[in-house]
Amino acid sequence: MARERDSSERAVHERDRSAHETEADPGDVLQQEGGPNWPLLIALLGGLVVALLANTFVGLLPD
């Protein structure tokens, strides 16, 4: 009886594991389709550069 339960639990575990592996994870899909989101990364980097330049020129203004 216990042996049957162990084998059925293993079968359920294997089935759940294989079902979990086939589910699409949004991060995995993004990486497989096109890699990193370059437009977002470029926009963030551009915003950082603009903020740095603005801060530099504001700092140069006389009081």
Image (cartoon, helix red, strand yellow):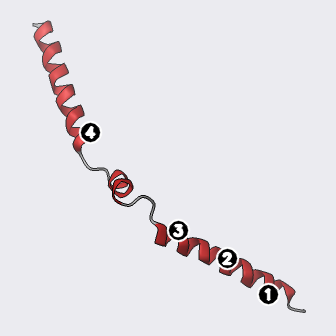
Task: Tell me the element at label 3.
Answer: helix
Q: Are marks 1 and 2 in contact (CB under 8 Å)?
A: no
The amino acid type of the residue labelled 4 equals Glu
Alpha-carbon distance for marks 4 and 2? 41 Å
Q: Which mark is residue 41?
A: 3
Report the residue that reaches farthest toward the bottom: 62
The amino acid type of the residue labelled 3 equals Leu
Q: Quadrant of residue 55?
A: bottom right
Task: Tell me the element at label 1.
Answer: helix
Percent coordinates x, y for residue 28 in the rendering: 35, 51
Q: Which residue is mark 2?
A: 49
Of mark 3 and mark 4, the one earlier in the sequence is 4
Of mark 4 and mark 2, the one earlier in the sequence is 4
Q: Residue at x 73, y 84 (%)?
A: 54
Alpha-carbon distance for marks 1 and 2? 14 Å
Q: Quadrant of residue 37?
A: bottom left
Q: Which residue is mark 1?
A: 58
